[in-house]
Amino acid sequence: MTRPAHTSQHTHAIEHISAALADRGLDLEQLAKNMRARSRDADTTGQISGPPWRPDDVQALNMNLLPTRHGGCPALQPLVAQATLMAYLGEADASLALALPGPGLAMPPIVALASAEQQVQFFRQFQSGTPRWGAFAITEPDCGSDATAMRSSARKTDRGWVLNGTKCFITNGARADHVVTFASVNRRLGRYGIRAFLVERDTPGFSVARIERMSGLRASQLAVLSYTDCEVPDGALLARGDEKPLDDAFSGAQRSWDYFRPLLSAVMVGTCRRVRDDLANWFDAGGKPADNRQRVASVEACLLDLDRQITAAWLLCHCTAWKADRGLTTSMDSSMTKAFASRMAARVTRAALELAGIDGIAACPSLEQGYRDAKAFDIMEGTGELQRLMIARAAQRSTSLPWDIAQPA
Ligand SMILES: Cc1cc2nc3c(=O)[nH]c(=O)nc-3n(C[C@H](O)[C@H](O)[C@H](O)COP(=O)(O)OP(=O)(O)OC[C@H]3O[C@@H](n4cnc5c(N)ncnc54)[C@H](O)[C@@H]3O)c2cc1C
């Protein structure tokens, strides 16, 4: 069968990253192998069994997303490098890639909203050989797509702030040591009433109500978090203390979405590469297409079509990350990337299932798992419908064509 087009381009970039991480004690290739070996178990149990990392890997994993000034790896600062890494890890297992230790989705709002001192305190914990997780909590049971309508409240007291509310679908929420939590000081102000707080796991009044049963991305353990008269000190309010107004905390959430949408899309690219490769290997080993009238040439054509779609999604991830690395605003690009990648993942995984049929699905569990992961992926970080809505709105506002690449000022 045709070998996938991604192999040669991908190898060089990942070798560079792998060498940089090896200098920090992380054996990336072994980590990916271990993740692959534990993929089925993680999908069945929703746990990070094993775990896939060695004790020596932990510090580099913890620090993977850290800015250089807080000890992060220089080779991983460009978003293009992060996307390349996430595609590589997504190829091993998407949900484990999202469940690896590190600040995760909490990193961008901390960089955008926290004071220098708060940043030092937050990032310091990740410079450790013990696995640490961060989480980002904005979604609530009654509002997900329209996050500005949130009901969680923050009330000022003499001693600090009291938080009340419920957050749901929080990635790594049950494992997180710290959760960046968004709550409103005045619901009538909409997005301008929203503030961000850094809540420690052991804070009285904060608890993990449950972990959701998921159809896909199970090891990322989406949690429901409860805040009942949860009292946090003044220092928990993320406040840069410079010219940035406090009432713009929602922009920190936007920062997180802009940053992570191309990375999550890269994870899906990796997942689809694996699905495509497992399917091709199964045909190579004598597997027969579900429709036995299909000849070898037409199976090859189908695989090439999958490659075409996967490559297009990867190029979009790469382009968005490239623009972000040059300081350009990428909200619309990030939405486009995620909208495209989630449709691609749904189409590719479904086509793979149809091509493989019952025998192929039984022989290659990654096909069915990839299909379920793709569904969860379409919802997280804003559903496909919402991404398309945002693209349409941005295109309406924009005076230039959306795909113009302006030079940074
Ligand atoms: C795997 C996964 C990980 C997640 N991780 C996190 C996390 O770490 N932190 C966090 O805060 N949240 C997280 N979420 C939550 C996620 O961001 C929300 O589920 C998502 O924003 C959708 O919100 P909702 O579930 O309330 O759906 P709703 O907003 O109720 O939407 C329901 C349906 O209506 C459609 N819809 C809604 N509004 C419109 C509109 N205006 N126009 C057209 N269609 C519309 C939606 O597309 C969807 O199909 C995660 C979700 C998943 C699945």
Image (tube, rainbow, N blue to C red):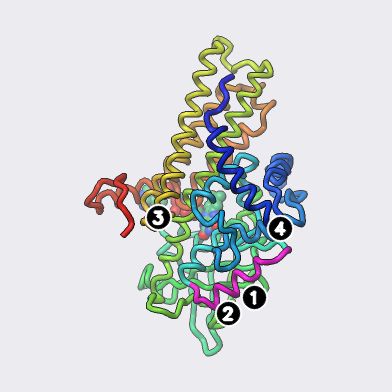
Give yes or no for contact between labels 4 and 3 (Cβ–Cβ under 8 Å): no
- Amino acid beneath label 2: Val
Task: Choose mark 1 or mark 4, whichever is in front.
Answer: 4
> Which mark, by number, is residue 232?
2
Asked whether the viewer can see residue 138, the reply is yes
Crowdedness near tag 2: few (<14), some (14–19) or many (≥20) residues, C-alpha within 10 Å: many
- Residue beneath the point at 57% across and 24% down: 3
Residue 149 sits above or below residue 353 on the image: below
Q: Quadrant of residue 372?
A: top right
Mark 3 to mark 1 CA distance (whole Å):
39 Å
Which residue matches tag 1?
Answer: 203
> Which mark, by number, is residue 58?
4
Mark 3 to mark 2 CA distance (whole Å):
37 Å
- Amino acid beneath label 3: Arg
Q: Position of residue 319 (x, y in %)?
A: 41, 45
Which of marks 2 and 1 precedes in the sequence? Answer: 1
Tell which of 386 and 337 is nearer to you: 337
Task: Choose mark 4 or mark 2, whichever is in front.
Answer: 4
Q: Secondary structure at mark 2?
A: strand
Mark 4 to mark 2 CA distance (whole Å):
29 Å
- Residue beneath the point at 51% across and 14% down: 298
Which of marks 2 and 4 precedes in the sequence? Answer: 4
Task: Choose mark 3 or mark 1, whichever is in front.
Answer: 3
Q: Secondary structure at mark 1?
A: loop
Residue 127 colored in magenta in the image: yes
Crowdedness near tag 3: few (<14), some (14–19) or many (≥20) residues, C-alpha within 10 Å: few
Residue 179 colored in magenta in the image: no
Mark 4 to mark 3 CA distance (whole Å):
30 Å
Q: Which residues are magenta?
A: 114-129
